[in-house]
Image: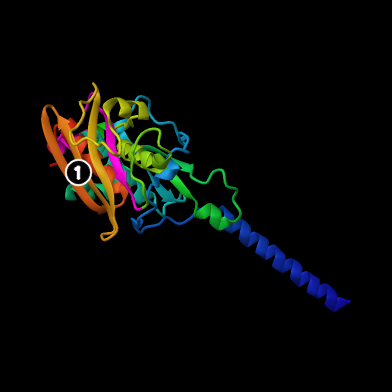
Amino acid sequence: MRGRKMRWGRCATLLLVFATALHQAGAQSPAPNTNPPELTPGHSDGSYLHSYLVAPKPEEPCPPNIDAIYQADTIVTGTDMRQRPWGFAQTFRTVLVKSSGDPGLMDDPRVADLAAHADGYVVCFSYVDMMGDIPIHDEQGTYDRPHKLTVTFAPAKIDAILADFGDKPWRGERPAVLPMLLVIGPKPPPYVLSADTPRGVEQRGAFATAAEEFGMTARFPNDTELTTWGVSVAHFPGETPRSLAGEATVIGTLEWNESLPGWVGKWRADWHGAAHRWEISGVNYDAAFRDILRGVVLLASGRGSPN
C-alpha cells in the first residue's frame, strides 16, 4: 500500500511539473528571427482562379482614395513569413510597372535592389484563402493553403522612386484593350477568341488577369460585332480594324507549335496612324497575352514601341 502511494505521489509531481512547463512555454513570446526571410518563388496566378475571387478584406483598413495603380496581388502559400517577402517583392515590381506604364521596370536591376526591401513601401496588405470553400482537414491543410496576397503601396514613395529613375506616374484615362485573335490550338478546329465562344473561357480569364497586372482593362468582341466586321476563321483580316474611342485593338494569330513546344503569337496594332507589329514564340498563352498588353502599354503611355 505504501509503495502504491509513493508511485501515485511521483506521478502527481510529474504532472504538476509538466503542466507548469506548458504554461511557461505558452506565455513566452517567440524569439525574433534574425535571419532575413528567404525570397522563394510562389505559385503562379492561374487564370482559372481569377473569376472566383472576392474583394479582400484587409486586417486593418487601408487609407482611403488610393489609386488602383498602387495596388497589386499575387499568389502565395500560407499567411506567414515563408512567402510574404517574396509576395511583397513581386507586387512591388508590378506596381512600378502599373503606375509608370513602363514594362521595362519589371526586370530593371535598380528595381531588384529595392524589391528586396519592399516592405518599407507597403501601406497595408490582406489575404484571401483561395480554397475558402474547401473544409480544412488537418494542420498541413491550414499551413499550405494558397492565398491571394493583395498589397497596397504608399503613392508618395512609389512616385519618388519613379522620379529617381527619371520617370513619372502614368495618369489619366487608359484605353481598353480589344484583342481580335485567331487561335489555332493543338486540337482543331481553330476559332476566333470572342466574348461568346465556350472554347475561350480560360484564355479570356488569362487575358483579363494580364490586363489587370498592367493597370489595363480588356474587352472581347462578341459574335455580333465580328459578323458586322466580316471577321471569321475563314476570313480573318490582315489589317487592324479601326478602334473605337477609348479602345486599342490588337489583331493577330495565336498558334500552337508542337516542335517548340509552345504558342507562337504575331500581333498588329495601329496607334495614332502608325502600324506596329511584334511577336513572341515558345511560351504559354499567359505569357503571350502579357506580350500583347506590354506592347499596348508602351504605345498608350508613350514609353516606346513594341516593334
Most foreground residue, 233 or 283: 233
Other residues around mark 1 within 10 Å, as few (<14) / some (14–19) / many (≥20): many
Residue placed at 13% from the left, 37% from the top?
276
Dividing the image into 4 quarters, which one contains the C terminus? Answer: top left
Look at the image and give the residue range highlighted in magenta: 159-186
Residue 61 shown left or right of residue 255 in the figure: right
Location of residue 124 by image quarter: top left
For the question of whether residue 89 can be seen, the reply is: no
Relative to residue 122, is residue 262 depicted above or below?
Answer: below
Of the residues shown, which amino acid type is indicated by label 1? Leu
Dividing the image into 4 quarters, which one contains the N terminus? Answer: bottom right
Relative to residue 187, is residue 63 depicted above or below?
Answer: above
Scheme of colours in the image: rainbow
Q: Where is residue 293 in the image (x, y as percent from the top left)?
A: 25, 38
Q: Position of residue 213 (x, y in %)?
A: 31, 39
Mark 1 lies on residue: 105
